[in-house]
Image (cartoon, coloured by chain):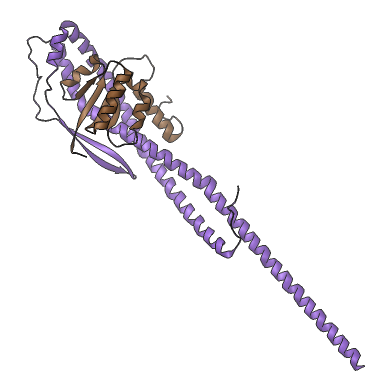
Chain colours: A brown, B purple
Amino acid sequence: MNDTYKIGIIGDRATVSGFIALGYTVFEAENASDAGRLLDMAAGSEEYAIIFIVERFAEALDDVIKKYSGRLTPAITVLPDGVSREGELSYGMRLIKQSVERAVGADILFRD
Amino acid sequence: MPQINVNPTRMELKKLKGRLTTARRGHKLLKDKRDELMKRFLDVVREERELRGKLEERFAKVRGSFEVASATMSRQVLTEALLLPRAEGSLSVSEENVMSVMVPHFSYEEAARTDGVSYGFLFTSGELDRAVEELSGMTADLVKLAELEKSAELMAAEIERTRRRVNALENIMIPQYEETIKSISMKLDENERGNTTRLMKVKDMMLEAQREANRAREQGNI
């Protein structure tokens, strides 16, 4: 393990290009399978402590993301993309809901 | 509840009683662990939910700015403008122990913060500046979100494991031990009673034999 890590971000060009300016390592992906390959590569390199992935791809890559869930790093986080869904929960929110259900046995957070 | 198949001896009884005590103590400890973990987990998840909600709103704004920027500028200029990182930060990771769950703690340091942007203002629009500015303000929150999310994930897994253990102890192991202990002590008691009756019987027989002998002797004397 080294001391400093990088932040990676995977997504389509329009969403992620702004992050280049912030010093994130940006992986542009055209589609979900492309993103999955990049994710495996980035996670396997162990250089990244945090990998953000846009919601659109994350939703399709559930099984790839689950592979890394037991490990401390990388933390693969769904990037909130700010696309409104009219009352429906975003994928990131649904993941929170899922983990609550898993731990508590019932959803006690989103009931309202 | 099926009991454990052991010989009904005092030795086994003593062993099982010891195991039952250990199981009860373990059960209590694990239950406490589960409850405390759950408390921490819910704190983390509440914070995470709030932060994610806030970030989603802010992203919606950035998205708008970016769309305006890319509409007013050519794609080439936009790509070029965003090519240079304005400040490459460094991210360090440390581990934190929350109820024996190792969770990561990320600290992000923005290296030598240069104010403003890394591109020229001549060909770029003001919207782009605003979008980049807003994005860079979000970095700390994003890192925090990643940390919370990872912690919640690891804690959820640990809670699930602990809950399973508690349930296994409560519903299977402890009743099983109790049942077996009960049946062994019943068998031992039964043996004990059998012994007593046998002794009483033997005593009766001996007394009877003695009486017979006495009677025979008396008849002989007459």
Give B182 or A69, whichever is nearer the viewer. A69
Position of B37 with respect to B65 (left or right) is right
Where residue B43 appears, x then y in whole percent? 34, 35
Give A29 or B106, whichever is nearer the viewer. A29
Image quadrant in which you'd find residue B123: top left
Where residue B65 appears, x then y in whole percent? 20, 12
Give B35 or A99, whichever is nearer the viewer. A99
Q: Quadrant of the C terminus of chain B?
A: bottom right
Q: Is residue B188 above or below residue A89?
A: below
Where residue B67 appears, x then y in whole percent? 22, 10
Q: Is residue B60 above or below residue B109?
A: above
Where residue B38 appears, x then y in whole percent? 39, 39
Furthest residue to the bottom? B221
Image quadrant in which you'd find residue A20: top left
Image quadrant in which you'd find residue B196: bottom right
Position of B101 with respect to A24 (left or right) is right
Residue at 27% x, 22% y is: B55
- Looking at the image, how many numbered discs can be counted on the residues? 0
Residue at 9% x, 16% y is: B119
Give A83 or A110, whichever is nearer the viewer. A83
Can residue A79 be seen by looking at this rendering? no
Q: Is residue B66 above or below residue B159?
A: above
Residue at 32% x, 20% y is: A33
Can residue B82 be seen by looking at this rendering? yes
Furthest residue to the right? B222
Position of A42 with respect to B164 (left or right) is left
